[in-house]
Image (spheres, helix red, strand yellow):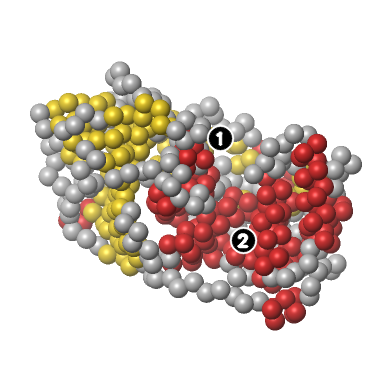
Amino acid sequence: MASKRSLFRRLKLRTVALTLATLIFAQAGALAAGADMPGTSGAAEDDLISRTILTEAGSIEVSTSCGDLSLPRSMSYQLSLKQSLDAEFTLITLEPGKSFSLRLGYDTPSIFTVDDDGLEQPAVYRGSFPDEPFFIRADGRELLVSPPVAYSTSGYGCVERETAPRLVLERRSDGWYLYTKCEEDSETVSSLWFFAADSLEGEGGYGWYAKCSVGLFDDTHLMLESGYYYLTSANHIPNGSNLYYRIAAPHIAVKLAESGEAVAQLLGVVMLDICLADLGEEGYVPTAPGVDWLMEDYGIQPGFFDTRFNTDFARALLTLGEWFGIDSFRSAALTIAESLASRIPASEDGNSFLSDYFNAPGAPEPDPPSHTSLNHQAAEAVLLFRAGMDEQALTLALALENTAPEWITSSGDLWYARSASGEYFGTDYPYLTYNDLLALRDELDARSVEHPGIDLLLESKLEWMEKNGVEYK
């Protein structure tokens, strides 16, 4: 591998002009364009907080209502890009007894879903909507609507999913409406969101919806005002068939961010912005529940730092921060990258492996330190390269380069992880690690750094995938 000193002489670091976001406290106004909320006259003056995310591509107006008990809580984004793509995202939270109506217009709306190939599939409305996000065309606009979910809060930052209120399509004297209500005697709150534009079709049609797994919302994934939630597994403490935890890696939002489709990326902007509220002062989004085997093997307590999940979150923030020129996104990504870099251990042999998991401040350091997964270290190196932290990124890449032969199993597959004592173990993912190593190779190539060890890992993994019929991207 080329030396770090010679590498930095050749580097031409790219700078990205970014604009600071401004925070504006606005007076009362409509909670969501086109929304009709019967029996209300608007929020009180201090109940509507707005801010503008200034970007190089346009503006993103964010308004959040709170405090007025006569209104549902809402979070509304007005997105306007210079390429003439205007969109709106609104997330509604209903407390018991509160209702929400959205006027669609006079024309009879048409409802459709999208199949795995991204093709439209007309949905026949018979009093109930699909149990996944669906599309509505009405009066020259298209909406992507996520059906209502009901939930109650639980411990360790979790929510428990309950029976949701019905979403209905109503014909009134002044047109068609979407309507839902949280029952008076409910002990839960309800939530739904919609994404609207003149057209939600991307350059590749509606393929972005299928490619980014948006249909999994309201199933294993939830998007709520407090963040992005994922269904707990049997390893989580606590766990349950209807228990969801706030996850550091908003999987669908990451896919939207990296889709390359402007309409999908705008939806990703909104979701990532909501998730930024979870970024703590320590420079990472914690995983609030415990995980049984992490607690048993390493003493990792609830509220821990999952490096891979945070790396994925930061990568998506950096992608959209650079693409749209959103300074707050890039700043948050750099905060996570710096937190990762600060935890890279010193090593006498020059092979520094960054642990997969760390305890929250105040908890004892894991003993022994957590293992290092191959996919974690490769992905972390890529993020650090993209964040401009080349020296730290090279430290991680060099450890993989120097130990490459040791990662290859007798079958040609790769070991999943390396313990702090240097033992290799575990079954690797079918192709995720291969993609991470490809991305790392590209970063090294961009800096004219030789990587025969990374090439060896890629060749062995590819041969194993082809031999075992693994489809990969």
Q: Left or right of 185: which side holds 318?
A: right
Quadrant of the rendered image containing residue 348: bottom right
Task: Identify the residue at the far right of this view.
Answer: 410
Toward the viewer: 402 or 155?
Answer: 402
Task: Identify the residue at the far top of this view.
Answer: 126
User: How many numbered circles are shown?
Assistant: 2
What amino acid is labelled 2 in the image?
Answer: Leu
Toward the viewer: 73 or 168?
Answer: 168
Q: Is residue 98 visible?
A: no
Up/down of 293 relative to 254, above or below: above
Point out the image quarter for the C terminus: top right
Up/down of 237 relative to 125, above or below: below
Quick one: label 2 or label 1, which is nearer the N terminus? 1
**Where is residue 157 shown, x and y percent of the image?**
48, 43
**Where is residue 233 shown, x and y percent of the image?**
60, 33
Q: Left or right of 283: which side holds 111?
A: left
**Where is residue 293 shown, x and y percent of the image?**
70, 39
- The residue drawn where x is 76% and y is 40% is 465
**Label of residue 383 in the image:** 2
Helix, strand or loop for disc 1: loop
Residue on which disc 1 sits: 232
Helix, strand or loop for disc 2: helix
Quadrant of the rendered image containing residue 40: top left
What amino acid is labelled 1 in the image?
Answer: Thr
